[in-house]
Image (cartoon, helix red, strand yellow):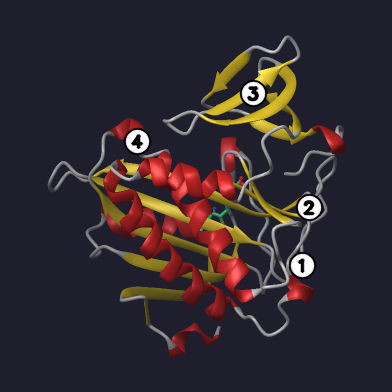
Amino acid sequence: MSIDAAPVVAGIRVVALEETGSTNADAMARALAGEALPFWLIADRQTAGKGRSGRSWISEPGNFQASLAVKVHCAAGQAAQLSLVAGVAVIGAIKTLAPQHGCDNLYLKWPNDLLVNNAKCGGILIETASDRTDGGMIAVIGIGLNLVSHPEIQGRRVAHLGGDVPSATQCTYLMAIAAAMLSALEIWNDGAGFAQIVARWLAAATPVGTEVAIHTGAARIEGTFAGLADDGALLLRDKSGRIQRFTFGDVELQAQAGTRAE
Ligand code: BTN
């Protein structure tokens, strides 16, 4: 991986590996073992990539899989906000690298999916642990992007960004994402600036009014996307017109019912 040429990005140290199980698991283990924060850990391949809700994340060589380990100073309940912080950063970085991804085909989908042409091309996984040395919190922000290829997943619409950004390498993406992440984390300011993050996230998301269904595990509720609550929860206008609030679940775009963009 050409990342060796840039051992520091946006002022943050980079650990670059050919292969690891999961960049999130590896970064968290290093942070808990006392490795100085912050740092990025990027790998060309993952053998046990982790997705949301216990799913696995298939990382084919040449795609982007990296995790940022940082110290945060927010209430435990606010750490999930980092998912939206990272979404804002990643979509901003991709739009910088690929100007042809205008506003019409690249979107964020709650809580942390990146869609191109309504198919999932990236995901974000936040993991936290308390730092026993000072009572603060370690956050690992994991980002997976299908750059050059994507796995075929039964019943899911999956895509990669590849052809649109032919000259962009993992290293180019890391530099752009690291800079955007630094700026998004500054705006977030340990939760104090979350309202600004929500506004930016909404501006980059599937439009309000998009027909969606949310799967909560126990139920599937159809309606339209009605934006986000102040705390980042999903708002859905159900068939009866009532606004329902969700803090977890998988959102399916109704236009592709039966093939979820994930
Ligand atoms: C999702 O399910 O959408 C989240 C996927 C997150 C995948 C990334 S790849 C880099 C980091 N390391 C992991 O094991 N997972 C995240």
* Tag 4 near tag 1, CB within 8 Å: no
> Pointer 3 and pointer 2: residues touching (CB < 8 Å)?
no
Q: Closer to the N terminus: mark 1 or mark 2? A: 1
Given residues 242 and 74, the one toward you in this image is: 242
Q: Give the residue number, with chain letter if any, for mark 3.
A: 236
Relative to 194, is 211 above or below?
above
Among the two numbered marks 3 and 1 on one chain, the one whose residue lies closer to the N terminus: 1
Callout 3 crowding tier (Cα within 10 Å): few <14, some 14–19, many ≥20: many
Where residue 126 appears, as percent x and y from the top left, is: 45, 46
Residue drawn 86% across the image and 38% down it: 256
Return the disc, 2 or 4, that comes first in the chain's sequence.
4
Question: What amino acid is found at the position of numbered circle 3 in the picture?
Answer: Leu
Q: Spatial distance from mark 3 to mark 1, Cα to Cα?
A: 33 Å
Are the two marked residues, 1 and 2, in contact with CB atoms closer than 8 angstroms? no
Residue that label 4 marks: 78
Measuring from the top left, give residue 10's x and y in whole percent.
36, 75
Judging depth in this view, the residue of 52 and 116 nearest the camera is 116
Q: Which residue is mark 2?
A: 158
Q: Earlier in the sequence, mark 4 or mark 3?
A: 4
Residue 149 — which label?
A: 1
